[in-house]
Amino acid sequence: MELRELSSLSLSDSATSVEPLEQIIDELKKELRSRHTVRLQQGLCSIELGFVWADILTNLERVSDHCSNIAGCVLETTDETLELHRSVRAMKNNNSLYEEKYRSYAAKYLG
């Protein structure tokens, strides 16, 4: 999602757009680790570079987790609740906006 698209959404809609992207990042991390294992087996990458790659992937996933937590807090304040995990679970369950964003991100980033 582009920055200009986010600015046209309400705060709640913007926060709701974060969680599907965080799920895609988790899937990308798994896929990228698998691809790296294949490169190691084929001798196309060194173990040393593999450690750097693993650290980068872990840190990128952490950033997405933090973004998800921030978005969850934003949703809590708009819903006036203080239950982050319940709010995130509720957003994922039977939420057409979540499903639409997830499919869009999956098509864009997972191909």
Image (cartoon, rainbow, N blue to C red):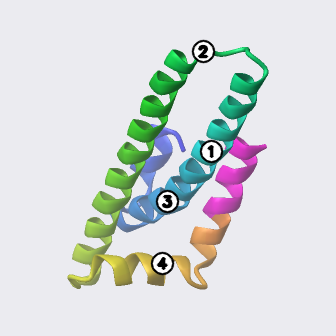
Label of residue 28 in the image: 1
Q: CA distance from mark 1 to mark 4?
A: 21 Å
Up/down of 100 relative to 86, above or below:
above
Q: CA distance from mark 2 to mark 3?
A: 37 Å
Up/down of 94 relative to 88, above or below:
below
At label 3, the amino acid type is: Ser
- The spot of residue 33 in percent (x, y) is 62, 38
Q: Earlier in the sequence, mark 1 or mark 4?
A: 1
Q: Earlier in the sequence, mark 4 or mark 2?
A: 2
**In the structure shown, which secondary structural element does the residue marked by tag 4 occupy?**
helix
For image coordinates 66% across by 30% down, the residue present is: 36
What span is colored magenta in the figure? 101-111
**In the structure shown, which secondary structural element does the residue marked by tag 1 occupy?**
helix
Q: Earlier in the sequence, mark 4 or mark 3?
A: 3
- The spot of residue 109 in percent (x, y) is 68, 42
At label 2, the amino acid type is: Ser
Q: As rendered, which of 37 and 93 lies closer to the eye?
A: 37
Label of residue 46 in the image: 2
**In the structure shown, which secondary structural element does the residue marked by tag 3 occupy?**
helix
At label 4, the amino acid type is: Met
**In the structure shown, which secondary structural element does the residue marked by tag 2 occupy?**
loop
Q: CA distance from mark 4 to mark 2?
A: 41 Å
Q: Earlier in the sequence, mark 3 or mark 1?
A: 3
Label of residue 91 in the image: 4
At label 1, the amino acid type is: Leu
Residues at discs 3 and 1 in contact (Cβ within 8 Å): no
Residues at discs 4 and 2 in contact (Cβ within 8 Å): no
Q: Which residue was labeled with disc 3?
A: 17
- Label 4 Cα neighbours within 10 Å, binned few <14 / some 14-19 / many ≥20: some
For image coordinates 44% across by 30% down, the residue present is: 56
- Label 2 Cα neighbours within 10 Å, binned few <14 / some 14-19 / many ≥20: few
